[in-house]
Image (spheres, helix red, strand yellow):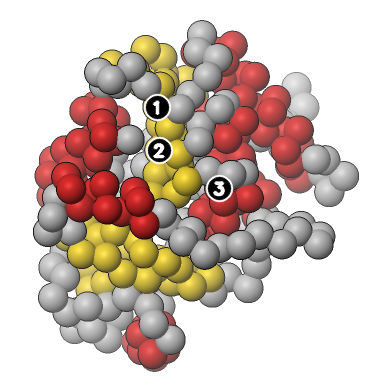
Amino acid sequence: MSAYTNPLDDPAADPFEVAAQAASDIARLTGVDHHDIALTLGSGWGKAAELIGETTATIPATEVTGFSKPALAGHIGSLRSILTPGGKRVLVIGARTHYYEGHGVRRVVHSVRTAAATGATTMVLTNGAGGIKETWTPGTPVLISDHINLTADSPLEGATFIDLTDLYSSRLRDLARQVDPTLDEGVYCQFRGPHYETPAEVQMAKTIGGHIVGMSTALEAIAARQAGMEVLGFSLITNLAAGIQKTPLSHAEVIEAGQAAEPVISDLLARVIGQL
């Protein structure tokens, strides 16, 4: 048996055609031909899928064209179709490809483009991240108001010019604050990873206007805007960033903080999605 070759690795492939094929696979495997909302679950947000509504289908992401096996422990590697009490269909993506895995931007944003191809017009992106504001304790959920892309890369190819004004929808952020008026917000800085940021890099991010540091989300949000989707972003502050926090950072700490906060933030996320 030959090894699986991801079609997105072919430079001649059209990534939107691959996404359309993936959407066709999802319709066939789930029995659901249209989704309204897509939700990417980052570290700490996994239990939200249980609270959104009735899961009518769960499929391994690797059975869908173009998807990769998650490289990170704590990520699920599945896709779910959920029916909300309000009658909307949510595609829950538990299979995120990170930029630091080295597969290229097309694979990083494939899940977003696939979600758009299933019909989803709202993209909810979540992550676990480091906080620069000292008032944020581990376990704090924060709305993403904007981002700074420090990957030196883009999912847009060729002379494709996309306006990113109000990328993280002010309308959806207002809606989220109706659910929880205590929600703070900040600017997310996506670094390349997989190493954590140095204290100097964190200070740089702070100086240029950043409040949150992480290794995902920004490239996905750009692709979602290109696809015409409205974007809502949440970060779970799993730790204070390097130099703000005085102890060394570890992935175990990120997982632990996510697990501790999961019941509260998952309930919050489910209530927000119920309002979309």
Quarter where residue 49 is shown: top left
Upstream in the sequence, badge 3 or badge 1? 1
Q: Nearer the viewer, residue 113 or 131?
A: 113
- 205 vs 15, left or right, is left
Circles 2 and 1: CB distance less than 8 Å?
Answer: yes
Q: Is residue 116 above or below residue 182?
A: above
Q: Is residue 64 visible?
A: no
Q: Marks 2 and 3: CB-CB under 8 Å?
A: no
Q: Dot 2, how many residues are within 10 Å of its Cα: few (below 14), some (14-19), or many (20+)?
A: many
Q: Nearer the viewer, residue 272 or 128?
A: 272
The residue under the point 40% across, 27% down is 90
**Residue 87 image position (x, y, % from top left):** 33, 17
Residue 179 is situated, as x and y percent measured from the top left of the image, at: 16, 45
Residue to which mark 2 is pinned: 39
Which one is earlier in the sequence, the residue at label 2 or at label 3?
A: 2
Q: Is 91 left, or right, of 137 in this rendering?
A: right
Q: Which residue is mark 1?
A: 90
Q: Helix or strand or loop: what does disc 1 sit on?
A: strand
Spatial CA distance of label 2 from label 1 is 7 Å
User: Which element is circle 2 on?
Assistant: strand
> Which tag is nearer the camera, tag 2 or tag 3?
3
What is the quadrant of residue 130 in the picture?
A: bottom left
Q: Amino acid at mark 2?
A: Leu
Mark 1: give few (<14), some (14-19) or many (20+) Cα within 10 Å: many
Distance (Cα) linking label 2 and label 3: 12 Å
Lateral position of residue 30 relative to residue 270, left or right:
right
Q: Amino acid at mark 1?
A: Val
Q: Amino acid at mark 3?
A: Ala
Mark nearer the N terminus (2 vs 1): 2
Q: Which x, y percent locates residue 64?
A: 60, 25
- Residue on which the image places disc 3: 224
